[in-house]
Every structure is written in C-alpha cells, then in structure tokens.
Amino acid sequence: MKNPETNTVIKVAIADDHTLFRTGVKTSLSSRKDIQMVAEAENGMQLLNLLRHIQPDVVLLDIQMPIMDGLATLPEIKKLYPNVKVIMLSMHNDHSVISRMMEIGANSYLTKESGSEMIYEAIRGVYEQDFYFNDLTNKALLSGLRTKRTVESSAPADVQLTDKEITILKLMCDEKSTKEIADIVDLSPRTVEAIRDKLKTKTGTKSMAGLVMYAVKAGLVESH
C-alpha cells in the first residue's frame, strides 16, 4: 500500500487555460522530490487526449476552461480512469458547486488563491487517503446537507447497515486510509474496499463525499 514514508513519486498533471497559473504551480512543486509533473493541458479535451498516453496519479483540474471545462471533464476522467485522483481548482468558492463536484467524484477542491503548501498537502492527501477535506469542502458539504435536509425530510433510516459496515464508515469519515482501516478491523484492504463499494450501493451514494454526507445525515458522525 502507499506509504508517505516511502520514496514514492506522485505523478501530477494540470489542466488550466492560464499559462501563468500552470507555470506557477509547476514551479512551486518543482522543489518537491516526491512530486513529478508529467503533463499539462489548456482544456479538458486536451487533457483527456493526454490521459490516453500518460497516467498521472493526481490531476489538478480547473473548473472554468474553454472548449471543455472541468465540470464536463471530471465525470469523463472518473469513468475512464477511476484510479486517477482529481483536485478541482476555481477562483470561486460557491458551496453548491463544490458539493456538486464532490458528489460526482472530485477528491478535493481548492481555490486558486491556495498557497503552494496547501496544493502540495492536497496532492499528498488525495494520493494517500483518496480525498482531502479542507474548510471549504467541509462547509460546502454541510451546506449541501442542510439543503437536502430541507428538501427531503425523510431520514435515511431505512438503510440497514451491519455493525462492521458502520465501524468502517466511521473510520472513513475519520479520514483513515484503506490500509489503516484494514489493520483496525482486521480485514484485508481488498475486503475493506468491497465493503466500501457495498456501502455506496446500500446508501445510494456515488462517492466518498456522498458517504460522508450520508453518515452525518444518519447521525453516525458529528458534523463539526
């Protein structure tokens, strides 16, 4: 399993139509020995063409781009390359957009004002833990949760989860990696992944963020 203490180099691609921003990100990450920039694109279509030949571990994906924007590109990446982690980038911090991005598979969301340290932390976070939550994503998810509560008053009490499933869901919400969860509950990482997939099916969610929202809504974890 991936371990931050190994000498693993994380391969990163960036799609953004602003050359200066791309250059700035590449420059800020160039000093990191565990990061390697492998591709850059000006829009989503160009990125998808590159992904046919280059497989990065993490993609930094701008939401607003000409020809094919991040909103259209994210589902395509997730469908074609489900193991690639995607960090969305935007100038805006609109909660409804962020929660929508997280629900359709984004692994994190950063504003373009984020410093190089936060971008680096987000890359490592999504690579090691599948997702990287920050104040922005947390507020957006909880804001989306409150909206959903208002729209649909029915609580998700009709979903029957086993004790083991609840334990694993709580550990996921605690940002434990698959390997850490496997060690805690004494199962193989593959079994933990199978239970995670089963949880998504049972709860009708499509992503890790959806599972976190379900857990908060069901009262399984506290919403800070």
Image: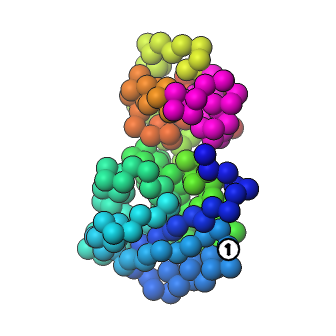
Q: Circle 1: is it few (<14), some (14-19), or many (20+) Cα within 10 Å? A: few
* 191 left or right of 119 in image: left
Q: Is residue 186 magenta?
A: yes
User: Could you say which quadrant of the image residue 54 lies in?
Assistant: bottom left
* 199 left or right of 129 in image: left
The residue located at (47%, 70%) in the rendering is: 13
Vertical position of residue 49 compared to residue 127: above or below: below
Q: What stretch is highlighted in magenta?
A: 167-192
Vertical position of residue 114 compared to residue 128: above or below: below
Q: How many marks?
A: 1
The residue located at (51%, 15%) in the rendering is: 161
Q: Nearer the viewer, residue 113 or 203?
A: 203
x, y percent for residue 143: 53, 42
Q: Does the magenta stretch include residue 69?
A: no
Label 1, on which residue? Answer: 32
Vertical position of residue 43 compared to residue 84: above or below: below
The residue located at (42%, 48%) in the rendering is: 105
Q: Is the magenta stretch mostly helix, strand or loop?
A: helix
x, y percent for residue 139: 59, 47
x, y percent for residue 224: 69, 38
**SS type, badge 1:** loop
x, y percent for residue 193: 50, 33
Vertical position of residue 180 compared to residue 77: above or below: above
Report the amino acid beneath label 1. Arg
Res 202 visible: yes
The residue located at (70%, 28%) in the rendering is: 184
